[in-house]
Amino acid sequence: MKKNTTATFAEMKAKGEKISMLTCYDYSTAKLMDESGINAILVGDSLGNVMLGYEDTLSVTMEDMITYGGAVARACKNTMVVIDMPFMSYQVSVEQALTNAGRLMKEARANAVKLEGGASVCKQIKAITEAGIPVMAHIGMTPQSVNSFGGFKVQGKSEEDAKQIIEDALAVQEAGAFSVVMECVPKDLAALITKKLSIPTIGIGAGNGTDGQVLVYQDMLGMFNDYVPKFVKQYASLGDMMKKAFKDYDREVKETSFPNEEHIFKIDNEIITKLY
Ligand code: KIV
């Protein structure tokens, strides 16, 4: 299999093949995803929630994204790695956006960056793209704007809001984004936008009419139960399996059945007796 790139995304849309994307934040898990044929990994700023325990993504820093993003990039041979630009790393100015996108490419070795917003961030998308850095846009429910939305809510249900999301989608495409994430928008609206765009759409909580899907990996493995959004499908109950393993380990340590003969290193009896 060869490395997934922006060209792969374009080819897959042209052929009507669906694109699989998952979030990931560490080397070991990224290797498993790479070996499983996942097309792209998003090192999302959702790491603020699932890795760092914040209640939203606002406190995530560039340094966080570089540390976790670098770990994922080092694991991926075939899977494309997209790294999120954290809150306030691109909103202040085009210059700052360009500098920070460059850091994610140079220091974390991303294959592309993602940023949130529609028409309002098109200047940044254009500048970053013109510098040779592929940009994935993110519209609909954009978690960095949770305070403006008044909570994590489905977007685009009224005619006015739906029109705004369509305009945002067309604007980010025009600005040069190679793909766009649509989060928490009604299925029929996401499908309509997918038809209108020539770039691939990646949905999360947007139905199956988009060109691809992304989920937070701890959500889809059943490892994160602080809250489980309606759009999540749990493909495994790893949280329960992990708790069982932790409990078994705890019990075996206490009853000294671990470690046993197969886990130990030996020394000559003659030597050990001299040491007493
Ligand atoms: O940060 C993230 O994981 C995301 C996805 C939810 C799309 O932006």
Image: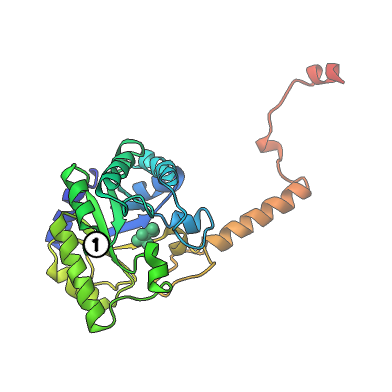
Q: Nearer the viewer, residue 88 or 48?
A: 88
Q: What residue do we see at 15% from left, 54% from top?
A: 176
| Residue 38 visible at all | no
- Which residue is rendered at x = 38% and y = 72% of the image? 149
Instruction: Residue 101: tell me if it is visible.
Output: yes
Left/right placement of residue 163 relative to residue 87 reads left
Q: Pick out the residue farthest to the right.
A: 276
Image quarter hosting the C terminus = top right
The residue sitting at 68% across, 54% down in the picture is 248
Badge 1 local density, few (<14 within 10 Å), some, or many (20+)?
Answer: few
In the image: residue 89, left or right of residue 241: left
Spot occupied by residue 181 in the image (x, y as percentages of width and height): 28, 62
- Colour convention of the picture: rainbow
Q: Secondary structure at mark 1?
A: helix
Query: Compared to 71, does 11 lie above or below?
Result: below
Residue 162 placement (x, y as % from top left): 23, 77
Left or right: 60 in relation to 175: right
Q: Which image quadrant for residue 105?
A: top left
Please identify the residue farthest to the bottom as the structure is shown: 158
Q: How many marks?
A: 1
Residue 96 spot, x, y in % from top left: 30, 45
Residue 199: x and y, percent? 16, 60
Q: Which residue is mark 1?
A: 120
Comparing 191 with 141, the one in front is 141
User: Residue furthest toward the front?
Assistant: 92
Ligand 1 lies in which image quarter? bottom left
Is the N terminus in the top left, top right, bottom left or bottom right quadrant?
A: top left
Residue 245 is left or right of residue 271, and the answer is left
Residue 5 sits above or below residue 209 on the image: above
Circle 1: residue type: Ser
Mark 1 near ligand 1 (CB under 8 Å)? no
Decide: is 211 above or below 273.
below
